[in-house]
């Protein structure tokens, strides 16, 4: 696969975090750790590749913007010669393979018409790999404070950005991903994520 090394991925994330500080880099690191943990028990996935892809899925947040980060990350990683990492920037938030499923309505999308057309076409014509699906799931298992249940993460997103006519279908798609990986690794994904109970509940039971 054409992806950077872990060391280069760390450098790219650090540079992006310095350009646009916030809570998002901590979320990204938990996504990477979740991807690595799940991949270690998956017969078809490489934990190192999974970690790097998780670490870079939001690298486009080095520039401010809501949806714009997916295009910024894609362009950056393509320019560096890493198309397999670049695609994750576009696919990680769209298990339904359509830009319309975003919680923001189209009039709030911070993309040009050309960029919207490109993302629409990319999602429609790209066959998702197991790595695409893995990062989609792991993006929904991590808050900046640590691992969480899928429901907790989706509730967090709904509180911050609202819901749309697509929300129920999105939640169903994420639940489908969770079941898919539970079956693939022969155990519940949650059992691999240290501290998930405490972080989800907000206290130690």
Image (spheres, rainbow, N blue to C red):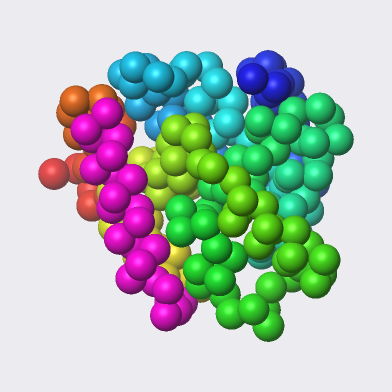
Residue at x 22%, y 33% (from the top left corner): 183
Does residue 144 sit above or below 194 in this rendering?
A: below
For the residue pair 130 and 198, the one nearer the viewer reads as 130
**Residue 158 sits inside the magenta stretch:** no
Would you say residue 78 is visible in this rendering?
yes
For the residue pair 40 and 199, the one nearer the viewer reads as 40
Does residue 145 sit above or below 6 in this rendering?
A: below
Q: Residue furthest front?
A: 125
The rendered magenta stretch, by its main secondary structure, is classed as helix
Would you say residue 142 is visible in this rendering?
no
Based on the displayed image, in which of its 4 quarters is residue 152 positioned? bottom left
Position of 185 compared to 17: left or right? left
**Residue 177 sits inside the magenta stretch:** yes
Q: Quadrant of the N terminus?
A: top right
Does residue 75 sit above or below 68 in this rendering?
A: above
Specify start and end residues of the magenta stretch as a single range: 162-184
Position of 126 compared to 152: left or right? right
Residue 24 horizontal/vertical position (percent): 59, 49
Residue 148 horizontal/vertical position (percent): 32, 46
Q: Residue furthest right?
A: 79
Residue 106 horizontal/vertical position (percent): 64, 78
Residue 7 horizontal/vertical position (percent): 69, 17
Q: Residue furthest bottom?
A: 107
Residue at x 59%, y 56% (from the top left corner): 124
Total residue callouts: 0
Residue at x 74%, y 53% (from the top left corner): 71
Position of 104 compared to 14: left or right? left
Residue at x 46%, y 45% (from the top left corner): 136
């Amino acid at each position: 696969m054409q992806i950077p090394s872990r060391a280069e991925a760390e450098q790219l994330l650090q540079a992006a975090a310095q350009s646009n500080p916030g809570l998002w880099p901590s979320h990204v690191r938990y996504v990477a750790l979740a991807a690595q943990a799940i991949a270690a028990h998956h017969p078809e996935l490489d934990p190192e590749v999974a970690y790097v892809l998780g670490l870079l899925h939001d690298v486009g947040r080095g520039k401010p913007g809501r949806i714009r980060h997916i295009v910024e990350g894609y362009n950056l990683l393509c320019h560096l010669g890493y198309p397999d990492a670049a695609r994750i920037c576009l696919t990680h938030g769209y298990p339904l393979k359509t830009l319309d499923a975003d919680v923001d309505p189209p009039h709030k999308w911070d993309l040009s018409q050309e960029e919207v057309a490109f993302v629409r076409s990319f999602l429609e014509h790209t066959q998702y790999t197991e790595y695409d699906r893995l990062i989609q799931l792991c993006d929904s298992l991590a808050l900046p404070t640590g691992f969480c249940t899928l429901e907790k993460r989706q509730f967090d997103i709904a509180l911050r950005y609202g819901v749309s006519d697509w929300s129920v279908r999105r939640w169903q798609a994420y639940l489908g991903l969770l079941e898919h990986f539970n079956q693939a690794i022969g155990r519940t994904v949650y059992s691999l994520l240290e501290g998930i109970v405490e972080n989800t509940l907000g206290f130690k039971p």
